[in-house]
Image: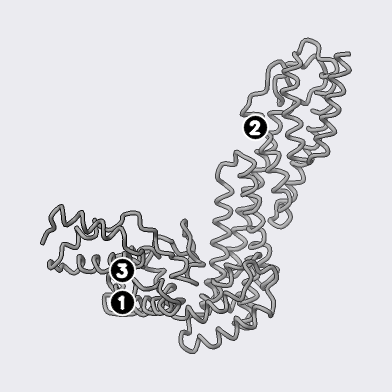
Amino acid sequence: MTLGLEQQAKLKSVFSAMPQKLVTRMVSVFQTGLASGDSSLPYDILLDLLPADMPEPDLETIFFPVSLLASNTAQRADQIPFQLLRDLWAYYAVEIDPVLSGSWQESAINLRNNRKQLAIGLRKIWEDEGGKARLVAEFGGKNTEKIPLIFSILSFAEEISELVSSWPDEIKELDDRYLLPLRDLNDLLVETDPDITPLLLLMLKTRLKYPQYILRAIERLSRQKSDLVVVNTDMYLIAEVLMDEAEELLLEAKNPIETGARVDEISTAMKRFANIVSGSREEFEISPTSVWGKRLYDIANQAVSFWSRRLKLCWEKIDEATPRVRTKSFLGGSLTGPDLRAPLDAQVSKSAIVNAYLLKQITHQASKIGFSSVSDEINVLVEERLRVSEDNLIDLLGDPGEIGLDILDNHFSTLVKIVRNFHGDEPANIINRRGAAAAAAAAA
């Protein structure tokens, strides 16, 4: 069956005037007809006539509380790709319940019914003979592994949502105010689904300011504080998720750091990394010889090795931009410093400034992560170099000789910016005033 151009124009005009809810329903109905092979209507043409700029369904609302785990860059076991939720909803609207799917916005009851029906439908396919293979063919193997997590949480969406809604956006201290209601809900739900406990903990982890506190919940719900016991239960998933996140944070730190904004991002990431690695050992009894302990200590050792190398690179970049020889006979530059007869290369200057900031910020986490000795050594080198460079350049500003003041100003400006990023505003302002006084005296 086909439609004439005049008919298509009239239908397109009608469709464009329809309420969004009705358009959404029609999309589901037409997609179902097309997928079924029904030839009584030209479903492909009808779909093309519907408004093309329809907004995406509110996946965060439809899939709540599963959507708390959704991410555009999902990699870990506690993360679900937004694209998978998008694809599941489209699949549900065609294959499971086309009629009900179009009504999810009409009322809270319809929304709850859609969640329930989606969970039932996915679970049935998963448990049917050949069902898992169908899902793998539809969504891919890696995504299909996430589907049991989705339908398990959606099966109790109402109960879990009520608990989650009682939590603040950020839980700073995990105590009985949160642990007791969590335990009560867990005790209720495990009667129906014995595997729900780690999934409840994943929900809780999304609200914790300090990720290691999730181990308190393991202790409360499992009544265990020994890693040797936990590694043999489904609760070990939570420990694995923590370590996966720690590895992800460390990997992020290995990417290029070329701006102050990137330094801030890395600083925040390393605070969280330190909380996971150091905090986990404070919250739980973790043996260095257990499966859990071996991996955790290996991650910590990787961080120590990486930051030891990275801080040495910070020093090299600062060393490259700061003069250290004081005598006028070495105005051409020292073996390790810049040539004072020419302006400092812009990239050298920028790199030194950024690395000074990185050194300052990451030093705050050195003791928790375990590279304090290297951090202390590099900080001593930088502090001494900045003192020497300050004296060098201020002496030259007061008596520039054959060096142009614009060139000295260029070097001095970089030094002030390095000091500002390393020591702070007040020390940088003091150096600035000293430089200005020296230059004024020379001009008098």
Counting from the top left corner in percent of width and height, residue 282 is at 70, 68
Q: Is residue 203 left or right of residue 91?
A: right
Give the residue pinned by disc 1: 125
Counting from the top left corner in percent of width and height, residue 135 is at 31, 69
- Callout 1: few (<14), some (14-19), or many (20+) C-alpha neighbours within 10 Å? some
Q: Nearer the viewer, residue 189 or 75?
A: 189
Q: Residue at x 56, y 50 (%)?
A: 252
Counting from the top left corner in percent of width and height, residue 7 is at 16, 57
Which amino acid type is marked by label 1?
Answer: Ile
Give the residue pinned by disc 3: 25
Q: Residue at x 68, y 79 (%)?
A: 177
Counting from the top left corner in percent of width and height, residue 105 is at 41, 71
Give the residue pinned by disc 2: 350
Q: In the rendered structure, are the residues bearing label 2 and label 3 in contact, judged by CB atoms less than 8 Å apart?
A: no
Helix, strand or loop for disc 3: helix
Helix, strand or loop for disc 1: helix
Q: Earlier along the polypeptide chain: callout 2 or callout 1? A: 1
Q: Is residue 321 left or right of residue 294?
A: right
Which amino acid type is marked by label 3?
Answer: Arg
Helix, strand or loop for disc 2: helix
Q: In the rendered structure, are the residues bearing label 2 and label 1 in contact, judged by CB atoms less than 8 Å apart?
A: no
State which quadrant residue 223 falls in: bottom right
Q: Nearer the viewer, residue 108 or 86?
A: 108
Residue reaching furthest top? 402
The C terminus lies in which quarter of the figure? top right
Q: Residue at x 73, y 35 (%)?
A: 418
